[in-house]
Image: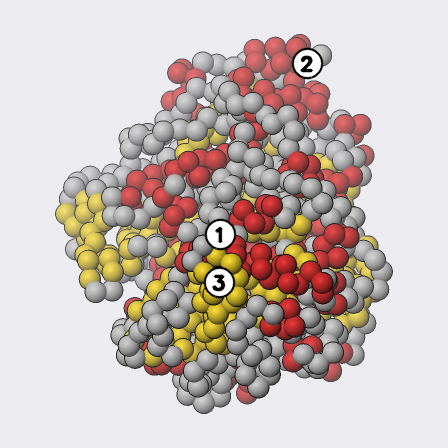
Amino acid sequence: MWKLSRKTLLAGKTSLSSNTAAVTAQYCHSSVKSETAVPQIPSTADVVIIGGGSAGCHTLYHLAKRGVKAVLLERAKLTAGTTWHTAGLIWRLRPNDVDIQLLNNSRNMLTQLEEDTGCDPGWIQNGGIFIAHTEKRLDEYRRLATVGNALGIENHILGPEETQKLFPLLDPKSFIGALYSPGDGVVDPAMLCTALTRGAVQNGGRVIENCNVTDLLVEDTSKGKELVGVATPYGNIKTKTVVNATGVWGRDLVQKHGSYLPLIPMKHSYIISETIPGVRGIPNIRDHDYSTYFRIQGDAICMGGYEPNPIILEPVAKDFHFGLYDLDWSLFDVHLNGAIKLCPSYGNYGVKSTICGPESFTPDHKPLMGPDNVINGLYHNCGFNSAGMMFGGGCGEQTALWIINGKPDLAMFSFDLRRFTVAQNRDTQWIRERSHESYAKNYSMVFKYDQALAGRNFQKDPLHEDMLAQNAFMEEKQGWERPGFFMKQKAEVLPYDWYGCYGNTRHAESAYEEALEGDLKYSEFSDHHKLIGEEALACRNAAAIFNMSYFCKLVMSGPDAQKAADWIFSANTNREANKTVYTCLLNSSGGVEADVTVSRLNSGTGAVHDPQFTGQGYYIVAGGASAYYTYSTLLAELRQKGFNVTIRDVTNDLGVISIQGPRSRDILQRIIDCDLSNENIPPNGTQVTSVKCPTSKGEQVGVRVLRVSFVGELGYELHVPKEHCSAVYQSLLAVGKPDGVRNAGYRALYSLSSEKGYHLWSFDLRPDDTPIEAGLSFTCRKNGDYKGKTAIDRQRNEGIRRRLVYLTLNEQVPIWGLEGVYRNGEAVGFLRRAEYGYALGKSIGQAYVSRKDGEIIDNDYVTQGTYEVDILGKRYKAECHLRSPFDPEGKRILGIY
């Protein structure tokens, strides 16, 4: 059956050399009237967009619609490069709420574009179906369904027979269920770009084809590298703002100026069938398990997928405008095989055309957007991982808002280039490994605690070997290895084996992968649930040691340090020395760009933990998962305001050892030289002192101690010079054994912080959340001015339309985030963050709830409703709290037990 079907299918395949021109002509419709003969370029522009594909055209459209005089420069013709041959699928249900909002914005724009521009964008709403072959996959789709419902995306879980009625070619015996989204569809890329550019031109935008940008014009200034224009063969254009929308060529554009993008090109393919009777207008299909998609194109089907061994390209030739590669059928067989198993009759039809072109891919399968790391005024909107048509509208709009307002209006951290460090962006081997794995796993199920196997051990903190010796199961965040939890036996990360591809041998055994498999759950708790609970309860009942060394650690000092702190931070940092303040960095809308602790310092000895400076100085500590984002956000604001300060990143020079719990003070007092009493180091106090422990240079190690807690317990952080971290850690572990101290990882840390009601940035605290909405109004001072204060004052005076609440479940059922929240039977939000509270003995989640009518929300509205949480399609009763029910009076952090 397989051989016959494959033979039949291939019988209609034409040679690529003879059909490339025909395929190109089929996909490249005439574009908007543009300036093509000896281009007449303007001398200046508000914004120059480089690249006339989906990303560039969408960005131009949204800028022009908002009155910005923007010019799009395309080296060939519109849609050249990748856009012209894309499949044009629009799917909206994703395991991320920001993704869904962006995709929904793209789809909604498509439905209005003809009315706005007078030009048909080629949008066809034929719906989309996700196929499930296993119960676990169906559980994943149930998760997508619940967050889709919360965000207003119509969807239905269907059985095989119901699904076959929508797509008659399906074999209903080959799968167990499906997720159907009737509002999804397809778009013609050339028609869409024509509509977008026509609309842009109507609003004052310009499109210039056959105009290559030969270089970015960059000047070195006191504020760093500043963009001043672009160079073309026809003259220069002066501008302070450029958008890099060059797709697979994005890295080449900026590298000569010392900026690097984590992006590589790969071949990506699909085939177009001959005419298949009865398929016109039926839904598109995505079968993740079989690595196959079907895109309906008139009376034919486009079929492709993501193979485990894609061909990684060297830099794509600059003149590869409308070129295609030969399709490697040995790689494509995995999709063909899956397609025929799912739809046996599909094998009876031949192939009309093959499409194999270059696409740009990134280490986490997300686009690269936002401000450049090096060149001020340069923005990126590229690296779309073959999803540029889906995300183009939403991401183009966010890019336009970024340029106009200085920020997007959605929480775009997972798209922002600054989610990667400069070191990661420069490392081509790391980029290749991670981008390959992201490509190969694109159709894999998404689990909260899944970990990459590629690009590991990129950056290790000073306690890395100590953690491995204690059997830590390591996780990776922003390139750093950190302990997730501690096992009974070793489970170390092995070198990347490329999943056995490219001549590599797959690891026969991997204790790490076996342990990781135990975390890949939907309907059950993790296999490590009990072990993590033991760590969490040790912290609540005795003491636990957390290695937090990968946290971001900065020293800000100089003549304007106080002025800078007053403007940047929402809380009052003008305190006496050795006081630590928890505060936020806000954007102009009052959204939280970062939450940090800020300690006022006295000038010290010059040691890394006791810095010496002139003027005033602050020690700033932020979460490690967003460390570079926090650093670059802070630096950009300082440069823009012109404050006379310096920022020194000491993250690599200091480790952080945190001991938390009722016994923490007694244990630490045995080795530390200062008095840890409330009188000497009160809550939020800090002090330079020393620790007694054996080292190669003596018995005393200088450290900075901070009395702070991320778990809601009496506790302390030791900020230790990296060369002494191991000795301090071993001493603390040894003296704490009689009191039951134990190691604890980030899984316990996050559980404990959620249980206490503390926030985790990028989850329940994001740039689209204000401190007032998040219950952090105490971090916003009422006197003086700071960035975002106008928005904060407005919310204080007028009230808020959504607010953060805490929900606990009495039934022992796991939650992972994105579960829908219902009040009196009506959808009011979804879980942004979800953990299990081991001291409470319950699952606990955080959600922002709002009224359906959009009116002001008050405490009575929150507390007087009956709540449910939708978990895999079943609603569970929940108790709603304005603050976490664990230690609501905050006594434990004061040492009152």
Q: Secondary structure at mark 2?
A: helix
The amino acid at mark 2 is Trp
Q: Quadrant of residue 740?
A: bottom right
**Alpha-carbon span between mark 2 and mark 1:** 52 Å
Q: Nearer the viewer, mark 2 or mark 1?
A: 1
Whether label 3 touches label 2, CB < 8 Å:
no
Dividing the image into 4 quarters, which one contains the N terminus?
Answer: top right
**Alpha-carbon span between mark 3 and mark 1:** 23 Å
Q: Quadrant of residue 133?
A: top right
Q: Nearer the viewer, mark 3 or mark 2?
A: 3
- Residue under pointer 1: 461
Q: Secondary structure at mark 3?
A: strand
Task: Please say if 17 is above or below 643.
Answer: above
- Residue under pointer 3: 699
Q: Secondary structure at mark 1?
A: loop
- Residue under pointer 2: 2
Q: Position of residue 840 (x, y in %)?
A: 78, 67
Does the rendering let one see residue 65? Answer: no
Task: Please say if 634 is above or below 870.
Answer: below
- The answer to which of 32 and 291 lies nearer the viewer is 291
Residue at position x 71%, y 45% in the image: 488
Q: Position of residue 477 (x, y in %)?
A: 53, 51
Residue at position x 62%, y 17% in the image: 349
Of the numbered discs 3 and 1, the one sitting upstream in the chain is 1
Dividing the image into 4 quarters, which one contains the C terminus?
Answer: bottom right
- The answer to which of 551 and 487 lies nearer the viewer is 487
Residue at position x 30%, y 79% in the image: 615
**Residue furthest out toward the front:** 698
Whether label 3 touches label 1, CB < 8 Å:
no
The amino acid at mark 3 is Glu
Does the rendering let one see residue 501? Answer: yes
